[in-house]
Image: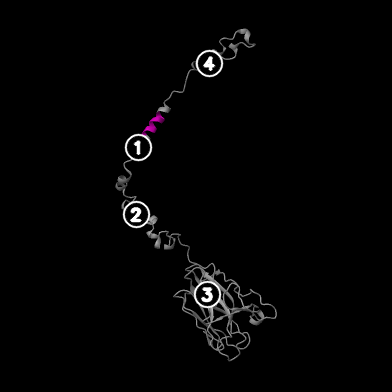
Amino acid sequence: MILSGTIAITPTVPAGAEDTEPAVVVNGTFSSPTVPAGQDWVTSVDGWTGGVTASATRAGHPRGFQAASLATAGSTNPLSTRLRGVRTGATVTLTWDDNPETCAAQGSGNRTYTVTVSGDLNTPGNFTTNTPTGRPNWFLGRTYSFTAVEDAPKITFTSTTTTNPGCRPVITNVAAKQTAPPLGSPQSSASSDPCAGDAASTSQCTAVSGNQAEIDKCPASDKECLASVAGDGKAEKDGIAKETQAVEAFGNIPRDQDPNTAAADLCALPNALTAAAGPGDAVVPPSDWWLC
């Protein structure tokens, strides 16, 4: 589409219109660090690497945000951050605002930059700001969509301006939405297999592999094969039969007895102890102590 006489080229990337779940962009409005009053810049951007932070006055954003100046092409420390909470396989749509910066006077040439993220199918996004006027001239709502090929993918903004390259574009209000991939089984990938890769040759894993081969030879559905391994269970069956007989014998023991017969058995001991005691040896005669 044509924007103020310049062309914004967007990459061929996965459709992001359905990306609705918020993804955190640390310090997306570049509010930290706060540029001290009377200063235009500070040479750091919290939560990001590269770039410098422009004060709200210098940025001139309609919502009063601070901004970040992009690093130049070939910089060893470009303006970049990682999208924490985004997992491999998620589709992500970035949005942000850009400005040619007030140092770019009218007629000084277009301010261009790229947005990149890892992944062979994620073509870099090439963007051109609104026409430089020597004043803030913000474009609100740039977008770039991609598919994450790693957890916490790294996004990078790099100035490709060739005319007066020291006067670089600035951006702010960076946000992201995503469509997260479905949660998979813990064993759904080779990385979760303790015997994947080089570990396959260890003694533990070769033993497991050998056991699996034996299991495959004799699956649980093959009763004849299992019988040849486990036996016919004769010892177990004999043991169960003996326990059954013991329970039956215990149940057949008679448990009813005549009370007088039981008393006779019980009286033998107290009678032996009191036999030598006469009527005058105790206030209560021994014959009254017990029913015996």
Q: Secondary structure at mark 4?
A: helix
Q: CA distance from mark 1 to mark 2?
A: 32 Å
Q: Which percent across, then down, holds residue 260? A: 50, 15
Q: How many neighbours does mark 3 have within 10 angstroms: few (below 14), some (14-19), or many (20 or more)?
A: some
- Quarter the C terminus occupies: top right
Q: CA distance from mark 4 to mark 3?
A: 99 Å
Q: How many neighbours does mark 4 have within 10 angstroms: few (below 14), some (14-19), or many (20 or more)?
A: few
Q: Secondary structure at mark 3?
A: strand
> Is residue 189 visible to us here?
no
Q: In the depicted view, which residue is nearer to us: 275 or 97?
A: 275
Q: In the rendered image, which residue does mark 1 sit on?
A: 237
Q: In the rendered image, which residue does mark 2 sit on?
A: 210
Inspect the magenta stretch and tell me whether residue 155 lies in it: no
* Picture disc at residue 155: 3
Q: Which residues are magenta?
A: 241-248
Disc 1 marks which amino acid?
Lys
Disc 3 marks which amino acid?
Ile
Mark nearer the viewer, 3 or 1: 3
Q: In the rendered image, which residue does mark 4 sit on?
A: 269
